[in-house]
Amino acid sequence: MRPKAKYAVIHRHRGEYPISVMCKFFGVSRSGYYCFKKRLGETDRDAVVAKEIEECQRRTDKTYGYRRVWKWLKGRNIQRDPKTVLRIMKKYGLLSEVRRRRQWVNLGQQVHKYENLLNRQFRAVRPNEKWVTDISYIHTKEGILYLSMIRDLYDNSIVAYKTASRQTVNLVLDTIRLAMKKEKVAAELQLHSDQGFQYTSQAYFKLTQSYGITPSMSRKGNPYDNAMAENFFSILKTECIYRHKPKT
């Protein structure tokens, strides 16, 4: 992982862990981080706040309205007035989806949780031994697009990705199917994710079982457990999306 990517992850989680601890964990200097932070301050302020709001909505499955998001930001020492928070949420498509979600999420479905088998061992000795996966949003000129990807820890390549207008279970399942169609997996494959509802679903359980995939899952509230997936989205958004908003 490049230093710039490490600094981006540290900055994203600065309200959760001490800067010194995170710098030590990633093997970078505090002075380097603060130089990164200073340069970051020169970019679009809305984009920086949007990244924090995205993290809030990711953790809460986009159930927070702007007032709760505003309080959440205050808890992370990010001072913005509520109307500014609402404006940024509208601008980046981060408004609550509670009402829409009731139409398609089965709250009574079986939930599966898995052990953290990856345990932050982010290196693999062979291809298709350890994969990590996650979903994030991309703000385009035509609206919000959700990106689901799978990354191989052997060479950090992207094995497969799919996009959709909603972050559904099927988006994740289609990504796995595409990856398995492209790759020849001879040995046991471990697939690591966070605890999003897509990854705890019965459909995800059945599909991984059918392919002989062993699921691994981050502990609750531990984003470092899936740092390589977070790292990919951080680089993508910092170096591409926030600089050049895609059309579609």
Image (spheres, rainbow, N blue to C red):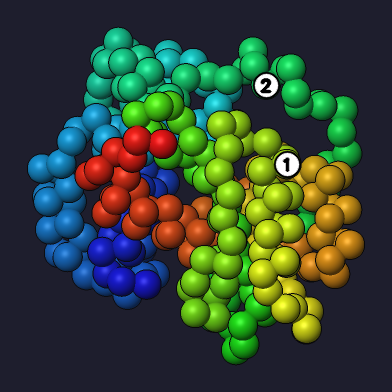
Label 2 sits on residue: 101
Q: Label 2 sits on what residue type? A: Arg
* Disc with the residue nearer the chain's start (2 vs 1): 2
Placement of the C terminus among the 4 image quadrants: top left
Name, please, the residue furthest toward the bottom.
125
How many neighbours does mark 1 have within 10 angstroms: few (below 14), some (14-19), or many (20 or more)? some
Look at discs 2 and 1 and give the one toward the viewer: 1
Q: Is residue 39 above or below residue 41?
A: below
Residue occupying the point 76% across, 62% down? 215
Q: Position of residue 213 (x, y in %)?
A: 79, 68
Q: Quadrant of residue 126?
A: bottom right
What residue would you read off at disc 1? 170
Number of marks in the rendered image: 2
Q: How far is the residue under mark 2 from the one under mark 1?
A: 14 Å
- The relative height of residue 205 versus residue 77 in the rendered view (above or below) is below
Q: Residue at x 67, y 79 (%)?
A: 129
Q: Position of residue 7 (x, y in %)?
A: 28, 60
Give the residue displayed 35% in from the left and 15% down from the top: 86
Q: Position of residue 70 (x, y in %)?
A: 38, 20
Q: Is residue 106 above or below residue 168?
A: above
Q: Is residue 239 left or right of residue 57?
A: left
Mark 2: secondary structure: helix
Viewer-closest of 28 and 130? 130
Residue 191 position (above or below residue 46): below
Q: Residue 25: x and y, percent?
A: 39, 70
Horizontal placement of 206 versus 155: left or right?
A: right
